[in-house]
Amino acid sequence: MAAPRTFVTLPHRHGFGVAGATKPAGLATVNLHVLAAGPLQTNAYLLSAPERKEAVLIDAPLGVWADLQPVLAKNGCSLVELWLTHGHFDHMEGAAEVVAATKARVRAHPADRNLFESPGMMKWFIDMFLPGHPDIRPVHPDSWVEGGATFECLGETVEVRHVPGHADGNVVFYLPKLAMAFVGDSLFAGSIGRTDLPGGSFEVLESSIRQQLYTMPDSVVIYPGHGPKSTIGAEKRGNPYVQP
Ligand SMILES: [Zn+2]
Ligand SMILES: [Zn+2]
């Protein structure tokens, strides 16, 4: 199955890649910018719609604002929303800075509320493998999203799918018209999220992937929280951990 768009990596000192989504004449274009940031090289994704002068960020690793701000300025876009796939610190520790600078509306799942709003509870854990890591600033989501919810943003319909098993509050933000799914740490290219952290369960994750991800069309491109993108079809055929 042909990929719905070409992925072009532009030379950029922060490692952004830019993919232009081709749409029929008369409809707005949505561009995807990819950035890995923070101590665990967590992927942040920026969707920009220059004709609407709006953009959305998916996940906020530490320091992401310094890299995003020039991209927003260059595209003439303001950040209207921040979608957090789950509450693990490497996906949310840059959020407070982004929200302070942009007033973006934050969406996340309520099962990870404590991780977003009281991240100090994980300090003992982070100190074990990242000694000296700065204290994590909380983020207070404006909009709690549940599995099955839909909302409109950038002229697109966004479907929320709940995929617990790696983290209780891991959600997928799925844009069916663009065949794009931002999956957090549930499913990776050739792998799956770890299930040995608090709230983790392999059986739950396996069921989430089968019911919420493998039910999407094979052509849907998945954008994970770490590493390269893949497609639903490629993972159904070749993922060694979860088969349909
Ligand atoms: Zn995670
Ligand atoms: Zn992660």
Image: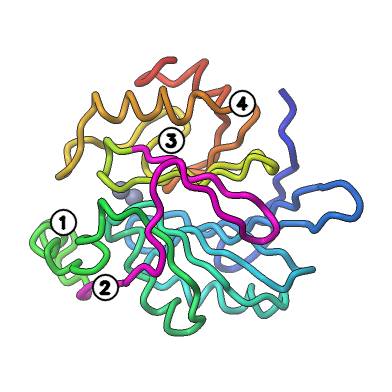
Packing grade of label 4 (10 A; few <14, some 14-19, many >=20) is few
Image position, residue 5 (x, y; %): 75, 41
Quarter-of-image position of residue 68: bottom right
Residue sitting at x 22%, y 35%: 195
* CA separation in Å, label 2 and label 1: 20 Å
Q: Which mark is residue 138?
A: 2
* CA separation in Å, label 1 and label 3: 23 Å
Quarter-of-image position of residue 186: top left
Specify the farthest residue to the left: 124
Three-letter amino acid code of the residue under disc 4: Pro
* CA separation in Å, label 1 and label 4: 39 Å
Would you name the residue on which mark 4 appears?
Answer: 217
* CA separation in Å, label 3 and label 2: 27 Å
The answer to whether the residue labelled 1 contacts the one labelled 3, judged by CB atoms less than 8 Å apart, is no
- Quadrant holding the N terminus: top right
Q: Which mark is residue 129?
A: 1
Question: Upstream in the sequence, badge 4 or badge 3?
Answer: 3
Three-letter amino acid code of the residue under disc 2: Pro
Three-letter amino acid code of the residue under disc 3: Phe
The magenta-colored residue range is 134-163
The answer to whether the residue labelled 2 contacts the one labelled 4, judged by CB atoms less than 8 Å apart, is no
Question: Considering depth in this image, is 161 or 118 the residue closer to the camera?
Answer: 161
The answer to whether the residue labelled 1 contacts the one labelled 4, judged by CB atoms less than 8 Å apart, is no
Note whether ligand 2 is within 8 Å of mark 3.
no
Question: Upstream in the sequence, badge 3 or badge 2?
Answer: 2
From this view, report whether residue 133 is shown above or below residue 146. Answer: below
Q: Which mark is residue 188?
A: 3
Image position, residue 16 (x, y; %): 60, 61
